[in-house]
Image: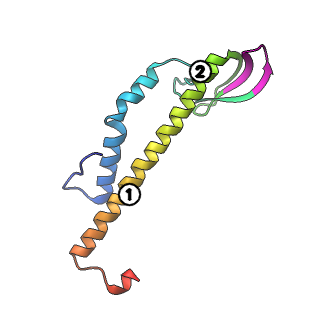
Amino acid sequence: MATRPRSTTLGHEVDLLLASELLGAHAGREAVQADTAGLHVCPACALPFVVAGHVRELVGVDRVRLELRCTNCGWAATAVHDDTELAALDRQADLAVADLLWTLEVVWIANEEAAIARFAAALAADAILPDDLA
């Protein structure tokens, strides 16, 4: 976890923590993912937001005609893909979900740290009354 800056407001502190966490050590992993070509990268906007849509038909034992669409720009195409390509697309979707869960955890931790800091400041200022704890 990133170290907390000392002379900022709590809201700015949360923003700095998120920027540090999202763009810090994790940035290398995202760069590696962005470099790999695959079905998950949209040919129109070049972002990794392509998801599988409707299965149109089975073409063979390991091939399927499938609709792909980009959730970012709306690009869509239907083509035949084999099991290897679809397994890679599925892995990328799993990584995207893991990244979202990681980001949610970072935001939750930052919010909890900010709430603890506010509570500690209120305690130090003797601003908490017995009625506040009930």
Q: Please, is residue 27 above or below residue 14 in the view?
A: above
Q: Is 79 or 12 nearer to us in this picture? A: 79
Give the residue at the far left of this rendering.
7
Secondary structure of residue under mark 1: helix
Residue 102 locus on image (x, y percent) = 44, 43
Identify the main secondary structure in magenta: strand
Where does label 1 land, which residue?
111
The boundaries of the magenta stretch are: 55-68
Q: Residue at x 33, y 60 (%)?
A: 114
Question: Does 117 sit above or below residue 60?
Answer: below
Q: Residue 11 or 115: which is nearer the viewer?
A: 115
Q: Nearer the viewer, residue 7 or 32?
A: 32
Furthest toward the right, the residue is 57
**Mark sitting on residue 74:** none
- The residue most toward the front is 61
Q: Position of residue 39 (x, y in %)?
A: 59, 21
Element type at mark 2: loop
Q: In the picture, which quadrant includes the C terminus? A: bottom left
Magenta span includes 64:
yes
**In the shown orientation, is residue 17 left or right of residue 81?**
left
- Which residue position holds label 2? 39
Residue located 34% across and 42% down the image: 21
Residue plotted at (42% across, 54% down): 108
Q: CA distance from mark 1 to mark 2?
A: 36 Å
Residue 126 in picture, x, y percent from top left: 23, 79
Which three-letter amino acid code belongs to the residue tagged 1?
Asn
The residue shown at (51%, 33%) is 95
Choose the circle earlier in sequence order: 1 or 2: 2
As shown in the figure, which amino acid type bears the numbered disc 2? Leu
The location of residue 69, given as percent across then percent down, is 65, 28
Q: What is the tally of numbered marks visible in this picture?
A: 2
Magenta stretch containing residue 53, yes or no? no
